[in-house]
Image (cartoon, rainbow, N blue to C red):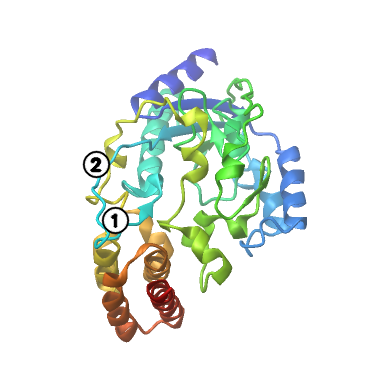
Amino acid sequence: MSDLKEFIKLNALAEGFDRIGIAGAEPFTETSERLLEHIEEGLISGLAWFTTERASYSCDPANLLPQVKSIISLAISYNSLDISIEYRPDNPRGKVARYAWGQDYHKVLRLKMERLFEKISEREGVREARFLVDTARIVDRAVGQRAGVGFFGKNTNLISKGLGSYFFLCEILTDLELEPDTTAIGTCGNCTRCLDACPTQAIVAPWKLDNARCISYLTIEKRGSIEPSLRDSIGEWIFGCDICQQVCPYNFKVVPSNHPEFIPSIPGISQPELLEWLRLTATEESFRAQFKDTSLLRTKRTGLRRNLAIVLGNTGGSDALSYLYTALVEETDPVVKEHLEWAIQKLLHVMVS
């Protein structure tokens, strides 16, 4: 068993994974109780699909693979660097969360897991397995903690010592009986930088996130209008948010990763030109052509355009007004039009005040 476990870990590293751990497949009882508590407190209200039934279902791996014996938890860093960009007032720029700079991680991680398990199957014979990347009903961070990959930080992200928190998680559920690794243990000590830095106060307490206030949720998952009281706090973020990770000391001295899949795929994607992206999202065709094979498709054209309007309202100058007026005339989606109008009114107010 130990030889097989070493074989799996060595081949996982060869496939490019940065952390590998083995977890037992028993139900995650404590996690289920915590999720149900958060639902009752209204902290997951932004995700209508995350019901009490889903929370309970997600915490038992056997619901996804009845014959599961072990879970292989895998992490890969997306801590890539992008070129620094000179800011000019007449050319306002926004911000994109680091995880979305490269290729869509769902495809990348699944392919790596399939190749890894193919090697395992060649050695052990055909075995049962299921590959999970973010979208399946499993509590992947709880799996990662149990497998020793990382511990929960106060911002609810998983932190791995030496790797920080800029990493993707995925899992292989299998009927192989593998010796589990030790559960990860770590602490944030007295640090509250993530709580203090969150512009929307979404981290309401250590290890508690009000999903409906999180900028990542607002700019990616949320459909429809964003509450006007939250728009100023979104600041420059047009897709996701990294603030609670940027201020985390565990990320300060982490060496940037060199995974080619997560090197910025679009020049300047970390700080995109807002007016140019407003033009590129004018039609569904141009939006899909520009952002194909990236995670930015998740927010859909209308969501990204809505976010661009908000950030232009927060950061743009008088030069942006003509672009906003043109976009307003051409736009047909009522939600996008509402946010374009908001941005125009905000900039006009700034000009006369």
Q: In this view, does 39 lie above or below 20?
A: below
Side (left or right) of 244 relative to 43: left
Q: Is residue 227 visible?
A: no
Mark 2 is surrounded, within 10 Å at the Cα level, by few (under 14), some (14 to 19) or many (20 or more) other residues, namely few
Looking at the image, how many numbered discs can be counted on the residues? 2
Secondary structure of residue under mark 1: loop
Q: In this view, does 63 lie above or below 79?
A: below
Residue 17 picture location, percent across and down? 40, 29
Looking at the image, which residue is at 64% across and 24% down?
A: 183
Residue pointed to by mark 2: 83
Q: In what quadrant of the picture does the C terminus appear?
A: bottom left
Residue 193, picture quadrant: top right
Q: Is residue 21 above or below residue 39?
A: above
Looking at the rendered structure, the kind of residue marked 2 is Ile
Residue 31 versus residue 348: which sits nearer the camera?
348
Side (left or right) of 237 relative to 138: left
Residue 1 versus residue 160: which sits nearer the camera?
160
Looking at the image, which residue is at 49% across and 13% down?
A: 3
Which circle's residue, 1 or 2, is located before the other in the chain?
A: 2
Residue pointed to by mark 1: 272
Residue 292 picture location, percent across and down? 28, 59
Mark 1 is surrounded, within 10 Å at the Cα level, by few (under 14), some (14 to 19) or many (20 or more) other residues, namely some
Looking at the rendered structure, the kind of residue marked 1 is Pro
Q: Which residue lies furthest to the front in this view?
A: 353
Residue 156 picture location, percent across and down? 61, 41
Secondary structure of residue under mark 2: loop
Which of the numbered marks, if any, corresponds to residue 78? none
Give how far apart the Cα atoms at labels 1 and 2 are: 12 Å
Q: Is residue 176 visible?
A: yes
Q: Residue furthest top?
A: 3
Looking at the image, which residue is at 24% across and 65% down?
A: 276
